[in-house]
Image (cartoon, rainbow, N blue to C red):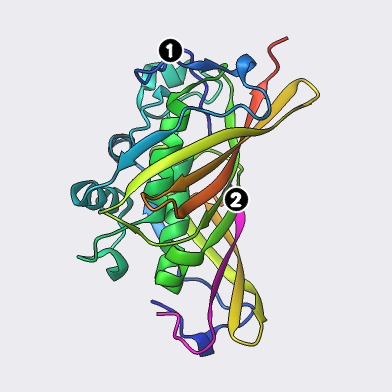
Amino acid sequence: MGIGSSAYLFGMERIEYSQLNQGYEFPRTVYRIDSTMVADYLGVIGETNTAYRDTGLVPPMAVAALAMAQLSGNLSFPAGAIHVSQTFQFHRLASIQDSFTSCARVSRKHGRGKLRLMTIAIDVYNQKKGRVVSGETTFLLPASD
Amino acid sequence: MMFAVSELKEGLELPRLTKPVSQENINRYAEVSRDFNPIHIDADYAGKTPLGGTIAHGMLVLAYVSQMMTDAFGRHWVTGGELTVRFKAPARPGDTLTVGGQICRVHSSDDREQVTCEVFCINQNGETVLTGDTSVRFRKNENSR
């Protein structure tokens, strides 16, 4: 839901919403998810499915969550911005052996009255360039003018 | 609880999950997902926004939907699942969320089945937090387990 905060910094120079035009590509980010992180994630969610127990598998939503967090860490949205919709497709298994590369771009940006909608497409690949997770996230933002 | 292929039919309810939301759990999710947006973790900041207080990450709520789908469809969800959701209202500390859904369509081809589900998340007051659709594909001759 709400995401806007101009005081919210992730260590990288943040990109203002007004600078984000359709087609803009965010800097790629690379990350890994080790067994401790998987265990922590499963513990927080309360996920006990045997699919993840001692299998080395990474929940696809954990892959997606880290891609989303890295994306939002690069953004500076006005207060009042809201995460309104989300799609994800899971394409193949993710493993603790994998290195993930997240690619994101602005796929749509348009207005609706005094509000603005922006959709960002995300693709996460493994080290073999196989797509693991893809999706689109849409934000509703107040007009700046 | 995981479904067998022979069980799959329209109207079949997905295994519901009930999840209490606490600030502690939101903080833990912020740590594992590295999403430290203050709207989720800073009560003073969040209290001054139109939301009036901290809210859970949308991705945390989505993780519960994914958990339900993993419970129902096992690895088939992890390797070929798709979801589209719309966030309708924030989940707040103190809420108790119920995640559920049902199969709304089973499409068969020669060797594959595609199951489409309607999913939802409501809070303890019956307010809709999230609605959406999910789908899973798998071969006919294999169990969904």
The range drawn in magenta is B128-145
Q: What element carries label 1?
A: loop
Is B130 a magenta residue?
yes
Indicate the position of residue A11 as horizontal and vertical percent values. Answer: 34, 18
The residue depicted at 40 percent of the width and 41 percent of the height is A101
Quarter of the image with the C terminus of chain B in it: bottom left
Chief secondary structure of the magenta portion: strand
Indicate the position of residue A73 as horizontal and vertical percent values. Answer: 43, 25
Check the image and name the residue furthest to the top.
A145
Q: What residue type is labelled 1?
A: Ala
Residue B89 sits in quarter: top right
Indicate the position of residue B46 as horizontal and vertical percent values. Answer: 44, 21
Classify B110 as above or below A22.
Answer: below
Residue B101 sits in quarter: bottom right
Instruction: List the residue tagged with mark 1.
Output: A7
Badge 2: residue crowd in 10 Å (few <14, some 14–19, many ≥20):
many
* Same chain shared by disc 2 and disc 1: no
